[in-house]
Image (cartoon, rainbow, N blue to C red):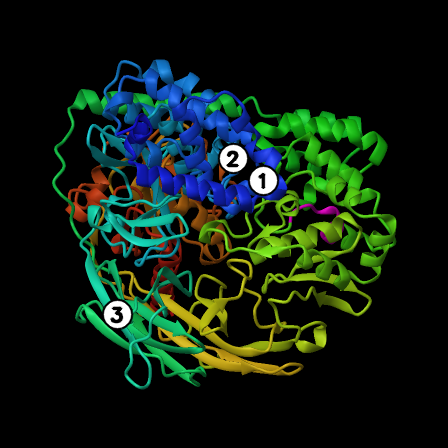
Amino acid sequence: MTSQTLVFSMDAQALERIEQKFQEKVRFAETCKDKLFHVFQQPLTEEEAWALKYVYAYMPVNDLADYDGELFLSHVRRALDVRKRVPWGERVPDHLFLHFVLPYRINTENIEDFRGIIFDELAERTAKLSMADAILETNYWCHEKATYIGSDLRTISPLSMIRNARGRCGEESTLAVAALRSIGIPARQVYTPRWAHCDSNHAWVEAWADGQWYYIGACEPEAGLNQGWFSPPARRAMLINTRIFADYPGPEDITLSEKGYTEINLLENYAPARTIGVKVINEQGEPVPEASVRFELYNSAEFYPIAEIKTDTQGDASFKTGHGDLVIRAVRGGKWGEILFKAQDGDHVEIVLDSSEQPSGVVDFDMVPPPEREGEVVIALPEEKIRDHNRRLEEGTKIRSEYEDTFLSEEEASALARLAELPPERVWDILQKARGNSQEIAAFLEECSGEFGEWPLRLLESMNEKDLIDTFRPTLDDHLIGALSQRGQWEEETFVKYILCPRVSYEMLVPYRSVFQSAYSEGEAAAFSEDPAKLACHLEQGYTYYEDLPNLKGKGNPAGTYSLMKGDPQSLDILFVAVCRSLGIPARLHPSEQKPQYLSGKGWKDAVFSRTSSRNEDSSGWGMLHLLKDSEAREDTPAASYAENFTLARLEDGVYKTLIYPDGHSDVYSDPFEVEPGAYRLTTGIRLKDGTVRVRFIYCTVQAGDTTEVVLTYREPEVDIPVLGKLANDSMLTRLDGSEVVLEELLGSEAAIAAWIEPEREPTKHLIRELCELAEPLNKLGVPIVLVVGDMEWNASFDPGSYPKLPERTIFVRDSSYAALSGFIPKPAAHEAGYPHLFVLDHQDQIRYSASGYRIGTGKESLQIAAAISQSLSGREE
């Protein structure tokens, strides 16, 4: 055996496979060869050379387009150096190092050189700890840096997360994985694509220590491993998996493996699982190979494929999932078949591809999630350890709060506004959103407003809130100057939205205008402006379509895509829009269809690429879908809310593509939806307290130039308001001013909502967000809302004033005795689910509804129950 075969314990065959894949990438990225591969001309050790080849061998297309070789070499050298310096470095097997320490990418984040920065902060803190304790300590560090807040789908980088001090769970877990890998601990982001028992999803982290994988809640430390508020929901999951950018052999169950990309199924580590075998046949009873089998789950009023698996040569596919209902849809060659798979059904199903047209009319059915289950008994921690843990949480919150105090203040924003002669409220709105990047944004405004007036502010206002956190001067200058040079004669609103604004989809913002403005001659630019269809043709002629990894489609930046001229269709769409805006041509992705369009004298026209149909080249090719209100709806039927209780989807190539409209969009009856002609499915759903959904499919067809009217209907909701018990309403609580008050005084003599909360944790933040969103109907209902924080859950930095949008009758109090909860919290299900513990009470303080832990939609359910109680009370008074 030669020394070469010992590199990372790989045999000659494995090294040959990496070399082959590496050479494929060299040929693939020929246009970026110097930028990407010049690092191999540097002196490299054998380990460095093979680690770098390994990184390139499995590199996504977007990364080849967007970054340079120095960045990847730095990641490789840092990872190898840290492995030698940390006490557990030699204990991490090579295959785990390659798959879960060396990789630079975790999610869809912008790639930065984070390892050295994070290692310098964590090395001394973890040097004398065991691997398990180092994982816990790293999570305390993450808690000091960031906390949860809901945000859009673009994933910010670990360093941007630190700068911002907050982010959604996918960003918290990206930071935690980056931190663990920076100190040589194998780590991976784990997620459930969609919950079955409620809407939304969640991501957390698994880390390896001395032969075993453990889980943690990212940026939400616990005193021990394998603990987290999400443990009870995870026991109801239908899939829990992780992505690996490599040909990963296991030992875990593999859901998907193709193109050097692997998804592994970790469900059995969290929940009871079963394997469903699917046989796909045609109308003649013959097996259908290469059929796409979609395992779909109801979530956010759509049927989302949590897994999509191809059948083998015998027409078979299998999927390990939880004990809940699924819609299974198989598609191949314009034919499809679909079944509702119930949890109590057998483990084998047969689907016949016998449909080529959608059904008509209305179809009703229920989707039942896996039942709630109790977890294993957890040994109680010593009081001393609990006190130490709570102290660490308090300290971490204080450190983060002190950092947030360094952000520019409203007074500083007002001073800047006066200096720059800009409206102070608008300047403060921008700087407040920029948070840790506020100094950078302020400097841009101060230096550019003198020359360009209000345009620098208008540029910032055109961007997404998250853009203000990780967009810096070179990018801002490029877009401001580049856009104003193309001002033209467009109306101001058109110019701002479709030329000045640099944001197209969820790509990283980079300085691309100067690139595209210098790429074309004056004659070419004039020809493209005269007829943007020529630009579409020009770009596509030089573009090679190549499907990127599923979660990275359209995430690359347009300058990178242009340099490589290879990528997925979404990246070409974004490139077209970016080039148009750079040349002064108003362009966009259609709001719901996400297809590239440019503005002409006749309105919006589609940019027609060979892969798309030209049927909608102008607006006359569209149709209208007009939703009508159900005149026979019951009073307790929910108000229509997009992506909450209804969605629209068009049938394309045998599957339904959900149209994109703003979540929570409720003004759905006044104006028709402008849609492409085709077959449509309207999905409505009402989720019951146990997580079951009462689903309705309404099928219709839209013709070009016509308006189709559809009545938006729901199945009858079930409002169950039994008496569940009674809170101890004589419990003594403390107002925030220090005065004492009895709970009964706060509840009054009407319906009320009371919740014991843990302000620092994600489940409570979801509840508070829901209450803020429901402020208007809750104010109209007029019920008191009492939010109680126990001494153990209180921290000095908690500021109730930071929730100004809560309903008017909301009051925060503190609870030292927890007496009112004594009859409910000891119950295993509620105790393990954790905070928040929410109760809806009637006028006699009887509990008519209760919910504990993480449950998206609790706010709506509480409103519904409280409204029913108030209605019954008013009826009694009459």
Q: Which residue is mark 2?
A: 111
Mark found first going from the N terminus, 2 or 1: 1
Q: Is residue 861 found inside the magenta-colored segment of the image? A: no
**Eyeballing the image, is 151 above or below 329?**
above
Q: Marks 2 and 1: CB-CB under 8 Å?
A: yes
Residue at 17% x, 52% y is 373
Q: Is residue 499 found inside the magenta-colored segment of the image? A: yes
Q: Please state which amino acid type lies under the numbered disc 3.
A: Val
Q: Quadrant of residue 789?
A: top left
Tell me where the magenta segment starts and ends, as one range: 496-503
**Eyeballing the image, is 526 above or below 564?**
below
Residue at 42% x, 60% y is 300
Q: Please state which amino acid type lies under the numbered disc 1.
A: Asp
Q: Which residue is mark 3?
A: 278
Q: Which residue is mark 1?
A: 66
Task: Give the CA separation, mark 3 to mark 2.
Answer: 39 Å
Q: Please state which amino acid type lies under the numbered disc 2.
A: Ile
Task: Give the CA separation, mark 1 to mark 3.
Answer: 40 Å
Front in this rendered view, residue 836 or 222: 222
Task: Give the CA separation, mark 2 to mark 1.
Answer: 9 Å
Residue at 53% x, 41% y is 26
